Image: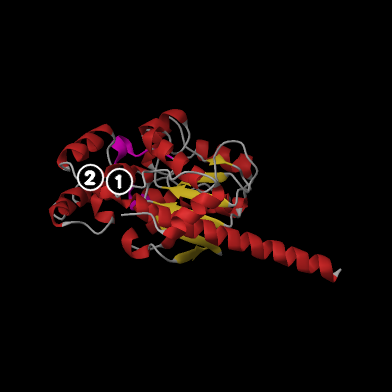
């Protein structure tokens, strides 16, 4: 899949090179597929199952076996009371509450909670799925290979999670604040127990847009069971904030051909954020002229 003129034009305007090769991806994947798949799966257990995108025929048999182990675990989840008053907490109180949360059984196996990172007034907010082993160890979302890819993706649209003004930085949070054991998929009860924390982070940041990355982030925010492939390409809304849907960086490491789709999502999100910023600036100018 080649770059479109719109994508290349945006990169040229920002003065950055493409963050993956401009050659057709088919060249890179023309070698036998089973070998790289086996290596990537062994190196990093997938959080999002292959069924999140329109699957090819060989992937279909994997769906029942992937879903079956999760069913018994749903009834075995250890649930406790949710913390009260989350919707009125400030940043320090919210962080402390997350650190001491025991609302589900994940508190028993975590090393530490993964609260979030970035500028608390960022114009972009990224929502991922759940911490992995390295995130659990470091207490920060999106580290390791997936995090490195995310950094390149952000740089390609002029953003960073390093020190920068809010217009250039992002705020990153996960649906779950604790790592599920062995990187298994999040359980519905765990997502529900953790949801007030994420909603409060969204309310405190008040970003221009949210980029939802990965099936569990997307389905949790939008309250839908539709796959990402059907939700991409349009703008959704949560709490009055526009939401753009895309694939998770860890998924892209296993499916590099879909990087072009994610780049299109990033372009859409960038254009949306710039238009909202321009509208906000125009409103300000109008108000100044009227005084």
Residue designated by label 1: 256
Visible residue check, residue 192: no
Instruction: Confirm whether the magenta stretch covers residue 219.
Output: no
Q: How many circles with numbers are drawn on the protein?
A: 2
- Helix, strand or loop under label 2: helix
Residue designated by label 2: 29
Tell me: 201 left or right of 51: right
- State the residue in front, 36 or 194: 36
Q: Nearer the viewer, mark 1 or mark 2?
A: 2
Contact, mark 1 vs mark 2 (Cβ under 8 Å): yes
Residue situated furthest right in the rendering = 291
The residue segment tinted magenta is: 178-189
Q: Write down the quadrant of residue 240 in the picture.
A: bottom right
Which quadrant is the C terminus positioned in? bottom right
Q: Position of residue 10 (x, y in %)?
A: 51, 54
Q: In the picture shown, does residue 51 fall above or below 132?
A: below
Which quadrant is the N terminus positioned in? bottom left
Crowd class of label 2 (few under 14; some 14 to 19; many from 20; radius 10 Å) = few
- State the residue in front, 46 or 277: 277
Crowd class of label 1 (few under 14; some 14 to 19; many from 20; radius 10 Å) = some
- Helix, strand or loop under label 1: helix
């Amino acid at each position: 899949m080649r770059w479109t003129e719109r994508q290349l034009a945006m990169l040229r305007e920002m003065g950055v090179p493409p963050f993956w090769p401009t050659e057709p991806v088919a060249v890179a994947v023309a070698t036998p597929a089973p070998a790289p798949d086996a290596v990537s799966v062994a190196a990093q257990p997938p959080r999002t199952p292959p069924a999140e995108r329109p699957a090819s025929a060989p992937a279909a048999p994997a769906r029942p076996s992937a879903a079956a182990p999760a069913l018994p675990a749903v009834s075995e989840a250890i649930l406790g009371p949710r913390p009260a008053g989350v919707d009125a907490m400030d940043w320090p109180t919210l962080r402390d509450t997350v650190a001491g949360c025991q609302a589900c059984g994940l508190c028993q196996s975590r090393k530490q909670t993964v609260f979030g990172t970035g500028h608390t007034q960022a114009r972009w907010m990224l929502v991922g799925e759940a911490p992995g082993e390295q995130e659990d160890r470091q207490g920060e979302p999106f580290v390791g290979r997936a995090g490195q890819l995310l950094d390149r993706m952000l740089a390609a649209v002029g953003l960073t999670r390093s020190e920068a003004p809010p217009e250039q930085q992002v705020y990153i949070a996960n649906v779950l604040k604790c790592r599920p054991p062995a990187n298994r998929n999040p359980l519905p009860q765990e997502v529900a127990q953790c949801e007030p924390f994420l909603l409060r982070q969204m309310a405190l940041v008040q970003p221009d847009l949210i980029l939802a990355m990965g099936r569990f982030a997307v389905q949790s925010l939008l309250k839908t069971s539709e796959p990402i492939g059907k939700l991409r390409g349009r703008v959704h809304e949560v709490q009055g904030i526009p939401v753009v849907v895309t694939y998770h960086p860890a998924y892209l490491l296993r499916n590099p051909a879909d990087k072009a789709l994610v780049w299109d999502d990033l372009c859409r999100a960038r254009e949306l954020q710039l238009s909202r910023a321009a509208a906000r600036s125009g409103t300000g100018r109008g108000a100044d002229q009227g005084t």
